[in-house]
Image: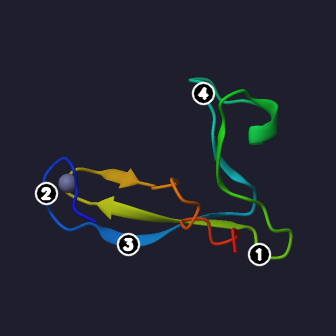
Amino acid sequence: MQCPYCGQEMEKGLIQSPQEISWIKSEKRTLFGRAEFYDGAVVLSKLSVMKGSAVVSHLCRDCQKVIIDFFDGNSDLNQS
Ligand SMILES: [Zn+2]
């Protein structure tokens, strides 16, 4: 994947967590981070009790950006 900011090739890697990884529409940290409690939330990686969660992401060190493509669910290592 090319960085949309600078055009350089991005490094493919993972973001991992022992909890669900989700995006919620909030600028404040919340007590309950799970997506099911929030309208419009996006689950980036479902929680596996045995494995935790992991989502494929792309990093640009120069721009200090990380991109996660969740469109087709293939980024979530717990999806399949
Ligand atoms: Zn960049």
In what quadrant does ligand 1 lie? bottom left
Callout 3 crowding tier (Cα within 10 Å): few <14, some 14–19, many ≥20: few
Asked if the beta carbon under badge 4 is closer than 8 A to the nearest atom of ligand 1, the reply is no
Alpha carbons under labels 1 and 4: distance apart = 26 Å
Alpha carbons under labels 3 and 1: distance apart = 20 Å
Q: Specify the amino acid type for callout 2.
A: Gly
Query: Mark 3 sits on what residue?
Result: 12
Estimate the x, y position of residue 9 in percent, counting from the top left: 20, 68
Q: Specify the amino acid type for callout 3.
A: Lys
Asked if the beta carbon under badge 1 is closer than 8 A to the nearest atom of ligand 1, the reply is no
Could you tell whether 52 is left or right of 17 in the image? Answer: right
Residue 25 is marked as 4
Q: Which one is earlier in the sequence, the residue at label 3 or at label 1?
A: 3
**CB-based contact (under 8 Å), mark 3 and mark 4:** no
Instruction: Work out whether residue 37 can be spotted.
Output: yes
Query: Mark 2 sits on what residue?
Result: 7
Estimate the x, y position of residue 50 in percent, counting from the top left: 84, 76
Could you tell whether 45 is left or right of 32 in the image? Answer: left
Q: Nearer the viewer, residue 25 or 33?
A: 25
Callout 2 crowding tier (Cα within 10 Å): few <14, some 14–19, many ≥20: few
Q: Is 37 above or below relative to 11?
A: above
Alpha carbons under labels 3 and 2: distance apart = 15 Å
Could you tell whether 62 is left or right of 18 in the image? Answer: left
Alpha carbons under labels 3 and 4: distance apart = 26 Å
Q: Specify the amino acid type for callout 4.
A: Lys
